Amino acid sequence: MLKVLTPFVYWAQTETQCTLKIDLTDVKDLKAKFDDKRLQFIAHGQGARGPHSYGFTLDFHSCIDPEESYYKVIDRQVDIVLHKQCNAWWPRLTSQPQKPPWLKIDFDKWRSQDMDDNEEEKRDVCQDYPDTYDWLQKEELGYRKEDLKKVYLIFYDLCQFVGYIYILAVMGIRYSRDGPESMRETYDAVGNPMKFIQLLRFLEAMHPLFGYTNGSTLVAFLQVSSRAFIVFCMMEAEPRMQEKPVVFYVFLIWSTAEMVRYLYYIVHLLNLEIPLLTWLRHTIWMPLYPLAFLCEDIIIIRNIPYFEETQKFTIGLPNAWNFAFHFPSFMKIYLLVLCLPGRYTLMSRMNHIRHKKLGKFNIKRKST
């Protein structure tokens, strides 16, 4: 039986895929089998030890999509593209921390989370990204220290998830025991946890500043501020609004949507893929967000006569600053001018992300 040798294999990755470059020429009789977490390769070609049969088996760190993965034979090598099931950076290619001696890093194609994806010019990673090069050297030894940023994000998302679960549990228990009468005391029961969660969410506006998440700091701040306005200015500042049933409904809608969102983030950070959860994350907002907007508008409209009566947050003339501010008029402007563009932008962005995550249909390409 002819002995099968192992070729040199060079790998690189992006957030969505891994590429393998197999150092073989004059390739014949190539067979490549793609499974969720394994690649089996065998071919006859000219390698480091001359013309021979070469093969290897790789057990991957995370799952790939076999239907979208493919290989291509060119004159000097065999290129393999592995599409990741969950878009995330892998700490290593293999499932085991011990690296095979024939597996190398393809520095020509290597990218990391700290590099600019739009950069087209090939550059020396050793000179331009010394920190990345040090990381790659550790990767060659087969290990990587746990990312503290990732640990922090998991802890933050877990705190938010537990908070919303607590609010839903308290509201559910009270409703099952007292029926609709429990709605009047919703704010007294879970108002403080909701205020704490909303204050904690301002950290999300700072995450893009520190590179913890992608996106815009301004957009994140506006999204967080809109709910904080409802909780602190519309509910906390007006005790009469706290007894309205609409508070129960808006807390219920918020908690349901955010519970799914933060659970999805946790699973994503752990490099797991749960299809049902992914579908829920990118679909549940479609009925819940419009309902939440309706409840928020009702709260603001119901509060306008209350603030007309109390003049809270209203600044009248004369005063030392020669400045006037009529809060009920601001509430009307907020509803008519500020809410609609922001909500349209949010819904359009969510729909774009949903189409990107759930509406992809790629055909497997394979050439020999």
Image: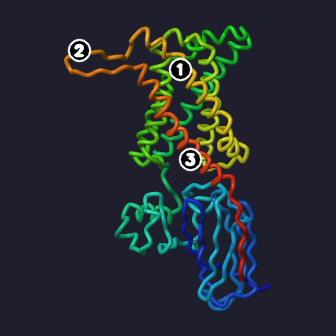
What residue sits 45% from the left and 20% below the top? Answer: 233
Q: Circle 1 sits in a helix, a strand or a loop, which is it?
A: helix
- Report, in whole angstroms, how far the alpha carbon at label 1 lies from the one at label 2: 28 Å
- Looking at the rendered structure, which numbered label has been put on residue 349? 3
197 on left or right of 128: right
Q: Nearer the viewer, residue 130 or 208?
A: 208
Q: Circle 2 sits in a helix, a strand or a loop, which is it?
A: loop
Determine crowd level at label 3: few under 14, some 14-19, many 20+ residues with C-alpha closer than 10 A: few
Q: Quadrant of residue 263?
A: top right
- Report, in whole angstroms, how far the alpha carbon at label 2 lies from the one at label 3: 45 Å
The scheme the figure's colours follow is rainbow
What residue sits 56% from the left and 47% below the top? Answer: 349
Q: Quadrant of the C terminus?
A: bottom right
Above or below 319: residue 112: below
Above or below 187: residue 70: below
Q: Position of residue 161 (x, y in %)?
A: 59, 32
Q: Position of residue 12 (x, y in %)?
A: 54, 68
Is label 1 in contact with label 2 (beta carbons under 8 Å)? Answer: no
- Looking at the rendered structure, which numbered label has been put on residue 158? none
